[in-house]
Image (cartoon, rainbow, N blue to C red):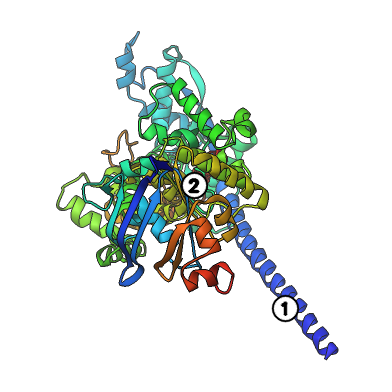
């Protein structure tokens, strides 16, 4: 999105290196993410795109041997600073995972979990509203409004993933990270999610890791191409897919490797 | 070539058939042993739930009891019952000489004096009258009546004399011997006399020990497991701890008994022979079992659930307490029950801390001396009297019943927990 003709940058990654133990997984990644746009990260398996995604909400902290160097600025605040509180950070930056992972609790509890732990809703009524709007935004409300108190694990795969999206947006995050959100879903469910992503970018900045180049072309405005831990090329999706600068990008896009 | 393939296929089917047969015979063997075991226990033990009574007419002669006229309750309490008790037994055979009178007396339990006294305390108007009173038969006659006594042995090899048998047979013929449900087996503490011995002390001892064990082992083990699994860094030191917890689970139980003896009794001076010390000792033994079970069930919670909670901005503590621990509870609980069941059946460590002592009182708290069910089995199995043989089996039946109830309880809890989210 442009304001006064200037691109608004939401996330600025500068010289990010990631190590798993002694093995370096990401080399010198610098990437700007535009606000209220969908940025797709593509590349062959093991190229580090998911690792990069997980740097953005510091999910790599969970892995003992993983260490992250470099700056990641979100709203001009370096999240790798010692003063950064991961709980606050993850409230602002939601995440949707590859495999739908609803909590084995009711639909209602799934969506209300975030607002509960962050103290967002003041009353039961307010919570009901949050749950309803989140489910509506995730295009799931009509299907589940009569069974909010049934287990979330009883839904179909596509519904579960939309439930996870509803859960992620329930705390109104500024950024939503999606790690191959459609890889476990059938084409119809995938189409639903893609539609949803388009809708969500009005209010959220979205970064999506995907294996499907067609998906990247369909949903994203910007694309970054990763290969062997390096960011080979990034720019507008149009340019990357039609006229990439780099030979490797060209080869990957046209299916010569990957 | 084709023929070869067919042969190979046949061979594979045959191999599978053979394997099934092995499996089935293994299961058959296991069931056979189980059935034999249960049959043996039940056939030996069921008679212990019946008790034989002699119905003897007792004349409450005020003079013999040294009672004044219109005695008070205290007087009746303090009266001398020995003479009327002796007399009523002697009167069973009016022609008995002194030796035979002695033998007659030994046909009932030494408790008979008290049984007569209780009769009068219940109904003081009996003074001067005659009433038929139920007296506990001696353990040997009890066995005779149940058909467990080798009557055809020569007399000098029996504890029951021909004379006693003759009188007893007369009583049986007159319908003066009755078999009733053996309440005292459940309400009496241990006794040197088989006919009076019961499991109340050891049952309560077991319950108190298990409670103490649960209250110590469960929280400690669960906290240790949660910390190790969810919070502790994975390094050499935690690896070392893990290895040692596994080793601890393999330590023979008697070693824990020695620890209890050396530390709890010798250093901390806790009261000997009590369920408190027994429970603490057993909790040391149960601790690794619960830790291992709790860790395994924490590990079984899919990491995606943890990631989901963390990504929502839950702290590590919230992730653990809201999601991981509740999901691991069924597994943890069943591990706890297995650990407690082990502890319930444990004998060796309790013997070392003195719970093998002869206890003829029923403990009211974990601080009172008590035995436990398996130790009671051990004590009775060591006793020579024939009357204890069936008691051993009966006690095993109670212990097994206790264990089965516990497992059932665990299953119900598990079922409820799991049903909620399946």
Toward the bottom, the furthest residue is B1
Quadrant of residue B37 in the image? bottom right
Where does label 2 land, which residue? Answer: B403
Q: Is residue B94 left or right of residue B353?
A: right
Q: For the point 14% across and 52% down, which residue is it?
A: B267
Above or below, comparing residue B132 to residue B270 in the picture? above
Residue B292, how many percent across, how many down? 39, 57
Front residue of this view, candidates B51 and A172: A172
Q: Earlier in the sequence, mark 2 or mark 1?
A: 1
Above or below, comparing residue A63 to residue A21 in the picture? above
Quadrant of residue A71 in the image? bottom left
Front residue of this view, candidates A156 and B166: A156
Q: Mark 1, chain letter?
A: B
- Identify the image quadrant of the N terminus of chain B: bottom right
Residue A103, how many percent across, how many down? 49, 43
Q: For the point 57% across and 60% down, which residue is it?
A: A213
Q: Is residue B283 left or right of residue B420?
A: left
Residue A11, how many percent across, how many down? 35, 49
Which secondary structure, mark 1? Answer: helix
Q: Is residue B334 left or right of residue A140?
A: left
Mark on residue B15? Answer: 1
Q: Is residue B377 left or right of residue A183?
A: left
Q: Is the residue marked by circle 2 packed among few (<14), some (14-19), or many (20+) residues within 10 Å?
A: some
- Label 2 in the same subunit as label 1: yes
Which secondary structure, mark 2? Answer: helix
Label 2 to label 1, Cα distance in Å? 40 Å
Toward the right, the furthest residue is B3
Above or below, comparing residue B400 to residue A137 in the picture? below
Front residue of this view, candidates B416 and A91: A91
Determine contact: label 2, label 1, CB under 8 Å.
no
- Identify the image quadrant of the C terminus of chain B: top right
């Amino acid at each position: 999105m442009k304001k006064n003709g200037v691109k608004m940058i939401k996330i600025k990654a500068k010289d990010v290196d990631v190590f798993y133990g002694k093995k370096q997984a990401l080399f010198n990644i610098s990437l700007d993410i535009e606000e209220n746009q969908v940025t797709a990260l593509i590349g062959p398996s093991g190229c580090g795109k998911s690792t990069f995604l997980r740097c953005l909400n510091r999910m790599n902290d969970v892995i003992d041997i993983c260490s992250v160097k470099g700056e990641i600025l979100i709203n001009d605040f370096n999240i790798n600073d010692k003063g950064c509180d991961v709980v606050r950070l993850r409230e602002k930056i939601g995440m949707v995972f590859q495999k739908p992972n609803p909590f084995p609790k009711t639909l209602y509890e799934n969506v209300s979990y975030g607002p509960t732990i962050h103290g967002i809703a003041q009353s039961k009524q307010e919570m009901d509203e949050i749950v309803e709007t989140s489910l509506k935004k995730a295009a799931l409300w009509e299907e589940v409004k009569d069974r909010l108190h049934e287990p979330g694990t009883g839904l179909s795969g596509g519904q579960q993933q939309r439930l996870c999206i509803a859960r992620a947006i329930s705390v109104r995050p500024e950024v939503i990270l999606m790690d191959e959100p459609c890889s476990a879903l059938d084409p119809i469910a995938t189409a639903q999610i893609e539609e949803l992503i388009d809708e969500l970018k009005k209010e959220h900045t979205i970064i999506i890791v995907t294996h499907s180049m067609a998906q990247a072309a369909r949903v994203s405005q910007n694309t970054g191409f990763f290969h062997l831990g390096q960011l080979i090329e990034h720019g507008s999706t149009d340019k990357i897919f039609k006229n990439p600068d780099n030979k490797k990008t060209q080869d990957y896009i046209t299916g010569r490797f990957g | 070539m084709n023929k070869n393939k067919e042969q190979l296929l046949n061979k594979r089917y045959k191999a599978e058939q053979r394997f099934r047969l092995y499996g089935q015979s293994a299961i058959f063997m296991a069931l056979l042993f189980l059935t034999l075991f249960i049959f043996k226990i039940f056939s030996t033990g069921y008679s212990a739930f019946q008790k034989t009574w002699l119905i003897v007419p007792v004349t409450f002669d005020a003079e013999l009891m040294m009672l004044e006229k219109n005695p008070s309750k205290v007087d009746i309490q303090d009266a001398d019952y020995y003479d009327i008790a002796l007399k009523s037994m002697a009167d069973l055979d009016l022609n008995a000489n002194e030796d035979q009178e002695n033998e007659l007396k030994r046909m009932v339990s030494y408790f008979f004096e008290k049984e007569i006294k209780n009769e009068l305390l219940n109904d003081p108007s009996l003074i001067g009258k005659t009433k038929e009173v139920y007296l506990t038969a001696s353990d040997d006659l009890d066995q005779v009546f149940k058909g467990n006594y080798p009557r055809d042995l020569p007399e000098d090899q029996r504890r029951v004399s021909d004379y006693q048998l003759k009188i007893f047979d007369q009583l049986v013929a007159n319908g003066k011997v009755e078999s009733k449900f053996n309440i005292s087996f459940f309400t009496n503490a241990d006794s040197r006399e088989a006919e009076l011995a019961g499991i109340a002390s050891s049952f309560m001892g077991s319950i108190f020990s298990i409670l103490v064990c649960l209250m110590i082992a469960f929280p400690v083990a669960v906290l240790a497991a949660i910390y190790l699994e969810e919070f502790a860094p994975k390094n050499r030191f935690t690896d070392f701890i893990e290895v040692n917890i596994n080793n601890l689970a393999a330590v023979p139980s008697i070693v824990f008994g020695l620890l209890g003896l050396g530390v709890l009794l010798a250093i901390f001076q806790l009261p000997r022979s009590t369920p408190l010390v027994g429970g603490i000792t057993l909790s040391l033994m149960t601790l690794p079992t619960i830790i291992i079970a709790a860790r395994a069930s924490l590990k079984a919670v899919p990491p995606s659930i943890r990631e989901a909670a963390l990504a929502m901005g839950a702290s590590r503590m919230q992730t653990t307490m809201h999601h991981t621990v509740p999901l691991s509870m069924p597994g943890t609980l069943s591990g706890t029950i297995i650990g407690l069941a082990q502890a319930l059946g444990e004998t060796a460590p309790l013997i070392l801390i003195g719970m093998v002592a002869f206890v003829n009182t029923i403990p009211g708290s974990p601080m009172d001396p008590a035995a436990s069910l398996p130790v009671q089995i051990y004590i009775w199995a060591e006793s020579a009297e024939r009357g204890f043989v069936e008691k051993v089996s009966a006690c095993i039946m109670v212990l097994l019943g206790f264990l089965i109830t516990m497992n059932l309880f665990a299953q119900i809890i598990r079922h409820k927990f799991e049903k909620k989210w399946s």
